[in-house]
Each structure stands twice: as structure tokens, then as C-alpha cells.
Image (cartoon, rainbow, N blue to C red):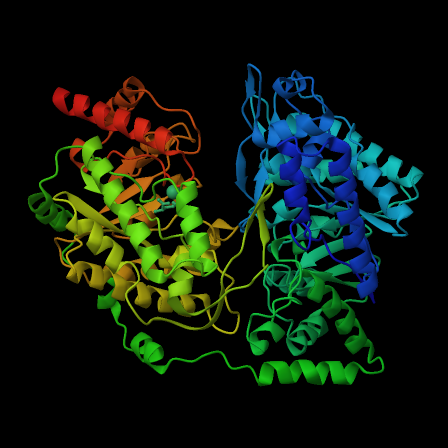
Amino acid sequence: MTKTIIGFPRIGAHRELKFATEHYWKHQIDQAELLKRAHEIKVAHWQAQKDAGIDLIPVGDFSFFDNLLDTAVALNVVSKRYRDLNVSPLDEYFAQARGYQANDETVRALPMKKWFNTNYHYIVPEFTKYTDVKLIGNKLFEEIDEAKTAGIDPKAVIIGPYTLLRLSRFLDGTKPADFVKPLIAAYQSLLNKLADASVSYLQIDEPALSFDVTGEEKAIFDQLYDGILGSASSVKVILQTYFGDIRDVYEDVIQKPFFGIGLDFLEGHYNFDLIKAHGFPADKTLFAGLVNGKNIWRNQYDLTLKRFAELKTDAPIVLNTSCSLLHVPYSAANEDQLASDVQQHLAFAIEKLTELVELDHIVNHDQGSEELLTNNQNLFKNVKHPFNQSVHDRIDALSDDDYTRLPKRSEREKVQKAEFKLPELPTTTIGSFPQTKDVRANRRKFRHNEITREQYDQFNRDKIARIVKIQEDLGLDVLVHGEYERNDMVEYFGEKLDGFVFTQNGWVQSYGTRGVKPPIIWGDISRNAPITVAASVYANSLTDKWMKGMLTGPVTIFNWSFPREDIARKDTVTQISLALRDEVLDLEKNGIKIIQIDEPALRENLPLRKSDWYKEYLDWAVPAFRLVHSGVQPSTQIHTHMCYSEFGDILTAIDNLDADVISFEASRADFTLIDELVADNFQTEVGPGVYDIHSPRIPSEAEIQDLIQQIISKLPVDKIWINPDCGLKTRSETESFESLKNMVEATKVVRGSI
Ligand code: GLN
Ligand code: ZN
């Protein structure tokens, strides 16, 4: 069988692309040097695929920032403000991705959004009435040349027009349908140019077909592809889908003259049913996504062979990954700090290439393949995930009561108002204060054993004392300890809980040059000692004001880790919830009466299809949060915090978390959230962030005042909190203190006026 992958991680085995790009941004290397290093990375990755035995090697999946931006740029979807900068094409590209600031020119970056149900973020292209779609870009063709010179026969890859239209923003009253014609022409000229370059295959990625597709959208899809495939071409076009099934368009897709159709049989399990119900045409090739592109675990060959056998079709089959390998780290080969049984179970990008090749051998009964299969079976037979009986007993004993906090929120609200006696429009922050150089240096020294635990802790205690005093002087009402002890809000808790393991180099691209190194859930999760209590209690002892404890919530810890696959997601998250529940009760017992449980990533794993939102996700995610806090006293106030995405469509679920107070990011979406809260009759007390912490700009007192006035004109004043959008850890201290000062002063003025 032919083996292929949809895409390969591009940051490099040791994040070489990240460092090269950042050096370029800092003017430490020039463009020629950046291109040279990028070329070396591309060639190394193609060669690794070839060496592993991959037949169709994707070319075009490389990117300096994001593939959707690459596609938009190739199609001349670039707004005038970037063109007007008159900089090199590469700098114009980076200007769209991250903004541009030089001399007195500043242009803001295009917005960034989460890519489907992953933690990768794409740049949102912008169509306006001036957008003149045509194929202008050379990136793909240059890469094809690079590949050919390196002895690689390329499968060209580009994102398709349907997904481009589905994910872009339309300004000036334009709409997707306006651009169908020029997009058809542009993709046709792409096919012509590929034919001229003697490229045999073009993979067009259309993951947006895994969303719900409306009748109107389907019409656009049909028009686009009837047009693009309207005239014959020597290039074999593969329609590649992933992240789910394509039930809304499957019957149309199999009618169209694609050479091949790529389906994801893991997240898109329903694709099996589609093939059963409607068949798969024998004159097309099925690109079968059977090796998971998202998880980091070894493929269990038995299971994959079963799935393979389920694909009843006479069509030729190409073995494929379920999605691009962009979402897994580069290689597990050097993770030798992990216990060997853990390491043996890991398959990152490089290992997944080998799995495709081995599966092919096994299906063909090639010589030696029996041994491959037996070894794989043994690996799974002998696996021992650390087991904790008491965790299982606790879960078995849970009942509905454990998920229900009493009395109901409106009653608690009265108790808490009497208890805390906070002024109207109480002010607070989201938790972290700037992680200044000295904070990071202290952590580094401790990690490298240059200072003792006691020295490390003392430094952080001094930081806490200082920031408590600063918050008092600023006049904030509910204080925090500043989170100086945390490198990362998930890693910190992962390290303190039993059941997690950590890689040395398991980086996954999050956006641009930014990567994350998610913890891995390996055993049963439990807490063996209090985690945050000492810091919160110390901070609390320094002030007469209320001190807010600060935890990361169970759903966020889960969503930002690599989960196990041998147990249900619900079971893992319940284990995390129970561990955090103990932490909440310990904080309460030690006098912390306000506790914030952050859930910034609640929305992240929301299924792509609306009909699945509750039954596949929210029905366990919401209870997981409730389990963490349902045991506290009525007078203990539970806060939560969310950022990074829209909330309008899940406000009911958010209210159902049954927190007492929630702070939201609101400024980047132009405060549309406030109207959504009104429309939804939102019940939880709420702090819509009054200024954007992602920007270095200091908001004026007047503008914050204005905003607070707007908020209280729409929402009940006794339910409103005043706070920034998110934690301050990435900002400078000057920016943070100035901004908070204006926030507190603005609040005081408004208080005086009501
Ligand atoms: N408490 C965290 C902080 O302030 C919240 C971070 C987040 O929302 N991502 O940094
Ligand atoms: Zn946040």
C-alpha cells in the first residue's frame, strides 16, 4: 500500500525554526540566513519521511507562521494596510501575523483563532470589497523546487477554498459567495502550474467539512469544486478532510471527480457508517486516516487492523494519518528521562511514520511482520498504568449530591454579601502579576540546584509580600498572591499531582513561534499534599483585605494535557476534580474564603458539531467543575475565569458551573459579551474584563469609566465586578500598575455616581 501523511511538524527537532525566526525578528540574522535555515529544516523533514518509507511526501505544509495565512497570501487575500507598508513579501507576511511597528508606522495584526478542536491557532484572513483573489504566491512552487532538488517527489499541499471562506472574516458587507468565481479561477491556475511543474498529486485540505454544513454552505462547496474540477488536469486531486466525519457532504463528495478522498476514521468514526450506507466508489482512492495525528501514543495495531478490515470497498487504499502531525511533538526517541515503559508507549511524529510503514507490512503479511505484530501486542498486554485503588473507590462512591452545591446561588449571594461587605463594583485581578526577570531567574537557579528550596521559597515569599502591599496601595478590594511560583498554570499543577509525566522536548506548536509542552497523563491522578495552601495562607496573613486563592480547573488541566486513551475522558477528568476538590477544602479550612478556579480552556474541546456539544463534552465537563467546589460553605465564594474565545453560545453551560463569580475576557471582542450576557439572563456575578492585557497600551481612567458606565447601564450593578481581561504575567510592572491604578480610580468615580 501507499503510505502518506497529511503534514509534518515544522518547528524542527529542537525548535530550530522558532529560534531562527525570532532571531530574524530581532534583526540578529538577515532574510537570506532565515531562508537558508528554513530550507535545511524542510529538507531534513522530507528526508526523515523518505527514510522511514513514506511514499507520498507532503510539500507545502511548511510555514513560517500559519498555513491558512500562507494560503490567503498565495491567493492575494492581503489587506491594503499591509501592502502599504512597502516592505519585503516576508515582512509583509509577518506584519499580518504579528503586527508591524517601525518608525511611526503601526499596523495591527490580523486576529488569531483556535484551529478546530486543537490548541493550534490560525491567523484569520480578511476579505474586503477591495480583495482581488488571484493566484500570486510562489511559496508552494519554490518548495516544490526545493523538494525536487533534494530528490523528493512531492505531494503538493494547500488549504482548500471552502475552508478558507469558512474561517475568514468578511468586511464591508462582503460575503463568501462573492469570492467563489475568482477562487475557482485561482485554484484552476494552481492546477495548471502544478501540471507544468510535473507534480502528480495535490492534496487540498478541507477540514471545515467536519463542521456542520448548512444548505447555503453546501451550495458554495458544490460550486467551488464543480468549477475547480470542471476541466481535466493531469494532477491527481485529493480532497483531504480531518478532525471529524463529513456526513453533510459525503454523498456529494463521492460524486465529484476527485482522484482521492481523505477521511479521518478516528475522530471521524462516523465515516465508517457513511461508507457502509453510501459505499465508496471503486474508481477513487481512499486515503484512510488510521494513525492518530493528535495523540502521542503508540498505535495499537490490533485495533487498527480491525478498523482497516471494516473499510469494505474495492477502491485502492492509501494508509494515512488522521490529521497533520503538526499536533504532536517531533520525536520520542530522546525522551530518556522517562521511565522506559512510558517511553516505549510514546509515538511522536517520527515514530508515527514508522507505524504507517509497519502497518503496511502487517497488512501484506510481509516477512517479519508477525514479529512486529506480536511485539506490539505484548507492549499493550504488559502495560501498567500506575493504579490507585482509593481514587477508584472514591469515584465509585460519588452520587448526584457531590455535584450539587447548596444552598442555591441566589441564597449564597446574600450570605456572601453579608460576609464580605465589599463595596459596590468590587475590584480584583485575575491572579498572576508580572513574571519579571528576577522571578524567572529565581526559578532557573532552583531548577539548576544553584539555590536551596528554602532560598527559592523565601524569594517568592518576599515577592508576595511586596505585591500584597502594592495591591493595598492601589486600593484593590480582593487581592491575590501573584502566582510567582508558577511557570505555567497547567504544568505547575501537573508537577504537584501524582499521575502526570513530563517530556524534555515534547514541544507542539501553539501559534507562530510559540510552543507548548503538554504534560502527559499516565497513571491515576491524585493529590498527595496541599499545593497552593502555603502561598495563599502566607499572603492572607499579610493583609486585612480579602485574599483570593488561585487554582487551575479540572477541564483546563485535562484539555492542555495529553490524555490517556485506554480510559474515558470523563474518568480522567473526575480524578483531577477530586484532587482539586481536596485542595479547595484545604484552602477553605485554612481561612481562604474566596477561591478562583480558572477554566480558560473550557471551550477548547467543544465538538465541531453543535449536536454533539452536550452529549459528548459539556455533559461531563460542567459536572467536573461542579465536583471541585460543591463541598464548600455557603459563605465561601467560588470564582472562575475564562478567556481566549467566544462564550455567547455556551453561556447557559457556564452559568451551570454554579460558580459565584466569573471574570471573562471581553475587550478583544469589543465587549459584545455584555449584550450576550443580557440576552442570556446570565445569573453568575460577572467581571467582564475592562481592559486588554495582551496589549502594552495603558487604558485611561476616562475610557474605563466610560466602559463601566456602559456595563452598569445594561447589567445589574450588584452583580458586577471590575477586573482586567486576564492575568498580568506577560506584562511589565509599570504597565500593570498604571493600568490598575486607572481601573481602581475609574471604579471609585463610578461608585460615587450611583
Ligand atoms: N490565573 C491565571 C493568571 O492570572 C489565569 C490565566 C489564564 O486565564 N490563562 O495568569
Ligand atoms: Zn485569562
Residue depicted at 51% across the width and 69% down the height: 564
Q: Relative to 343, is 491 above or below?
A: above
Q: Is residue 488 visible?
A: no
Q: Residue furthest left?
A: 418
**Residue 373 locus on image (x, y percent):** 72, 81
Where residue 191 appears, x then y in whole percent? Answer: 85, 38
Q: Is residue 458 above or below residue 397?
A: above
Please report the residue visible at 72 percent of the width from the left and 31 percent of the height from the top.
Answer: 30
Residue placed farthest to the front in the image? 450
Above or below, 737 against 107 in this view is below
Q: Nearer the viewer, residue 252 or 258?
A: 258
Q: Is residue 467 left or right of residue 238?
A: left
- The quarter of the picture where residue 14 lies is bottom right
Judged left or right of residue 371, residue 494 is left
* Rendered location of residue 163, percent (x, y): 64, 40
Quarter of the rendered image showing ligand 2: top left
Q: Nearer the viewer, residue 586 or 554?
A: 586
Residue 474 lies, with reference to residue 395, above or below; the image says above
* Rendering coords of residue 503 (x, y %): 55, 63
Residue 124 seen in the figure: yes
Identify the residue shown where x is 44% and y is 33%: 694
Q: Residue at position x 64%, y 66% from top?
A: 332
Q: Quadrant of the N terminus?
A: bottom right
